[in-house]
């Protein structure tokens, strides 16, 4: 690997680690700071109150996971987040499959560093979870892909899930705030019980708007390019380009940023530090992601709005 390649890889890594704040993220951090400050005050004063939490909802590619990751990074100085230490104030895990409360409880115990014994039933496992949350002094438990907790379950089974979640926040031994993130189906769990709903601050990451978000999207592309010290061609500064980029990302903010970083990466590795960001770089990225031919590529096709950007191996049936 040449020195030039190493330099470019560092630039790309810097782009990948860059975070673009959004109104949704500002709301997420504001609610988290409020909960954290209240939790600190309660612990200092020896007060045990029912904990509250946050539910973050968005489509695939909206940037939920990135937002949670940035939230922890921004608050690292306030939180002890190393799972290998005795105290870990923020525990995060992805809901396992199958998403029964027994398997979720077992996964939570493992995330807490507790050796799980597989012969226990769901309620007994969650009793152990609550003990470990106290021992690790965990203030927040984050469950990602939490919509799976309600998948393929009856109302009665979902209510059992809700009751378990509430018991974590209402535990008089050590109440722990929940942060649930997932797809829109997560709303079914939250709305299953009014008591759970009012204990969670709701945040939804909305989709991009083809008209309203043209300028913000172009600004983001320019900021990424400036960070990479790459010039941009006029063709990636137009309203039409912004609309094509949004459509290619299925109007999801996270995917839009990801495609932009990949296009810059392609430009840099193709032409080095003298690269100029062009429309073709975005078209090539979409092809890499979908294997779609030109007539099904939003950056090339004239009638791009008819294309389903989530499909792979797409071709124009008329030209098959």
Image (cartoon, rainbow, N blue to C red):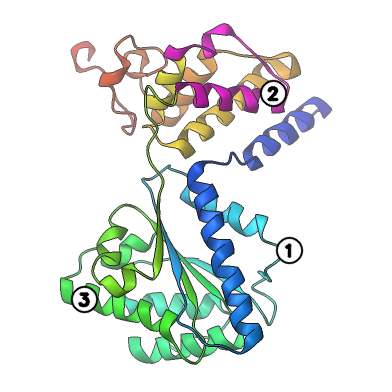
- Few, some or many C-alpha atoms within 10 Å of disc 1 (few <14, some 14-19, many ≥20)? few
Q: How many labels were placed on the picture?
A: 3
Q: Quadrant of residue 137?
A: bottom right
Q: Residue at x 53, y 72 (%)?
A: 140
Among the two numbered marks 2 and 3 on one chain, the one whose residue lies closer to the N terminus: 3
Q: Quadrant of residue 95?
A: bottom left
Q: Answer yes or no: is residue 119 visible.
A: no
**Res. 187 mark:** none
- Few, some or many C-alpha atoms within 10 Å of disc 3 (few <14, some 14-19, many ≥20)? some
Mark 3 vs mark 1: give the one in front: 1
Asked if residue 234 lies in the magenta stretch, the reply is: yes
Q: Quadrant of residue 249?
A: top left
**Res. 157 mark:** 3
* Label 2 residue SS: helix
- Few, some or many C-alpha atoms within 10 Å of disc 2 (few <14, some 14-19, many ≥20)? few
* Label 1 residue SS: loop
Where is residue 288? Give x, y as percent. 46, 27
Residue under label 1, please give it.
77
Among the two numbered marks 1 and 2 on one chain, the one whose residue lies closer to the N terminus: 1
Q: Is residue 205 left or right of residue 46?
A: left
Instruction: Measure the alpha-carbon separation of dots 2 and 3.
Output: 51 Å
Q: Is 161 rendered above or below residue 320?
A: below
Span of residues in magenta: 214-240
* Label 3 residue SS: helix
Where is residue 235? Give x, y as percent. 52, 8
């Amino acid at each position: 690997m040449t020195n030039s390649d190493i330099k470019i890889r560092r630039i790309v890594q810097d782009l990948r680690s860059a975070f673009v704040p959004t109104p949704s993220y500002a709301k997420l951090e504001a609610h988290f700071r409020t909960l954290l400050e209240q939790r600190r005050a309660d612990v200092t004063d020896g007060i045990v109150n029912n904990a509250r939490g946050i539910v973050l909802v968005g489509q695939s590619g909206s940037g939920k996971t990135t937002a949670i990751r940035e939230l922890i990074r921004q608050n690292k100085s306030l939180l002890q987040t190393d799972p290998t230490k005795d105290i870990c104030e923020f525990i995060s895990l992805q809901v396992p499959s199958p998403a029964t409360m027994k398997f979720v409880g077992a996964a939570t115990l493992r995330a807490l560093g507790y050796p799980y014994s597989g012969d226990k039933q769901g309620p007994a496992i969650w009793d152990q979870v609550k003990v470990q949350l106290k021992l690790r002094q965990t203030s927040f438990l984050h469950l990602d892909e939490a919509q799976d907790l309600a998948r393929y379950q009856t109302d009665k089974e979902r209510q059992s899930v809700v009751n378990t979640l509430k018991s974590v926040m209402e535990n008089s031994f050590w109440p722990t705030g929940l942060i649930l993130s997932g797809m829109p189906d997560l709303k079914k769990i939250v709305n299953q019980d009014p008591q759970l709903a009012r204990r969670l601050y709701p945040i939804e990451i909305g989709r991009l708007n083809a008209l309203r978000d043209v300028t913000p999207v172009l600004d983001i592309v320019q900021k990424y390019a400036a960070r990479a010290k790459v010039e941009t061609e006029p063709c990636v500064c137009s309203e039409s380009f912004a609309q094509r980029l949004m459509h290619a990302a299925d109007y999801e903010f996270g995917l839009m940023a990801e495609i932009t970083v990949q296009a810059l990466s392609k430009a840099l590795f193709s032409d080095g530090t003298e690269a100029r960001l062009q429309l073709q770089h975005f078209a090539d990225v979409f092809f890499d992601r979908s294997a779609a031919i030109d007539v099904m590529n939003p950056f090339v096709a004239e009638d791009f709005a008819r294309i389903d950007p989530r499909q792979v191996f797409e071709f124009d049936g008329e030209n098959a």
